[in-house]
Image (cartoon, rainbow, N blue to C red):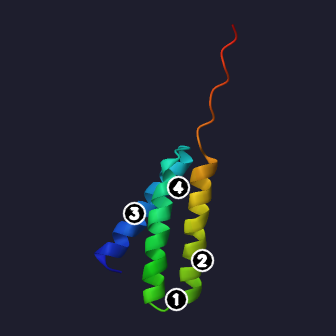
């Protein structure tokens, strides 16, 4: 693995840690890292793995949108 691979792997783990802490930003990180892995895997000829990473990138977009902040209900008067 190159230094670039290690950086992407560390960013992926950062996404996991943020998700454990219920931070929406985890999905943005995962979108970036999964998209990067998709390209790396496709370049290496690992087409099934590249497809999986592409699906994960799409799921990260879905997760980011689904975890939108819910507006607080109006205060009772």
In primary-sequence order, the first of circles 2 and 3 is 3
Image location of residue 57, percent across then percent down: 55, 67
Mark 1 or mark 3: which is in front? Answer: 1
Q: Quadrant of the C terminus?
A: top right
Residue that appears at 59% across and 43% down:
68
Tag 4 secondary structure: helix
Mark 1 surroundings: few (<14), some (14-19) or many (≥20) residues within 10 A = few
Residues 76 and 45: in front is 76
Residue sitting at 46 percent across and 75 percent down? 37
Q: CA gap, disc 2 to disc 3?
A: 19 Å
Q: Does the residue at mark 1 contact the one at mark 3 (Cβ under 8 Å)?
A: no
**Residue bearing the label numbered 2:** 52
Which residue position is annotated with label 4? 27
Dot 1 or dot 4: first in sequence order is 4
Q: How crowded is mark 3: few (under 14 residues within 10 Å), some or many (20 or more)?
A: few
* Measured Cα–Cα span from mark 1 to mark 3: 21 Å
Across and down, in percent, residue 61 comes to: 57, 59
Give the residue drawn at x 59%, y 66%: 58
Residue 17 image position (x, y, % from top left): 49, 51
CA–CA distance in space, label 3 to label 4 = 15 Å
Report the front residue among 37 and 2.
37
What residue does disc 1 label?
A: 46
Up the image or down, 48 lies above or below 24; here it is: below
The residue to which callout 3 is attached is: 10
Disc 1 from disc 2: Cα separation = 10 Å
Circle nearer the N terminus (2, 4): 4
Mark 1 or 2 closer to N-term?
1
Using residue 6 as the reference point, say whether residue 62 is left or right of it.
right
- Position of the N terminus by quadrant: bottom left
Mark whose residue sits in front, 2 or 3: 2
């Amino acid at each position: 693995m190159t230094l670039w691979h290690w950086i992407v792997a560390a960013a992926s783990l950062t996404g996991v840690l943020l998700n454990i802490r219920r931070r929406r930003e985890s999905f943005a990180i995962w979108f970036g890292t999964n998209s990067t892995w998709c390209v790396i895997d496709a370049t290496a000829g690992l087409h099934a793995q590249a497809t999986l990473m592409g699906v994960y990138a799409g799921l990260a977009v879905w997760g980011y949108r689904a975890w939108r902040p819910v507006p607080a209900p109006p205060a009772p008067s």
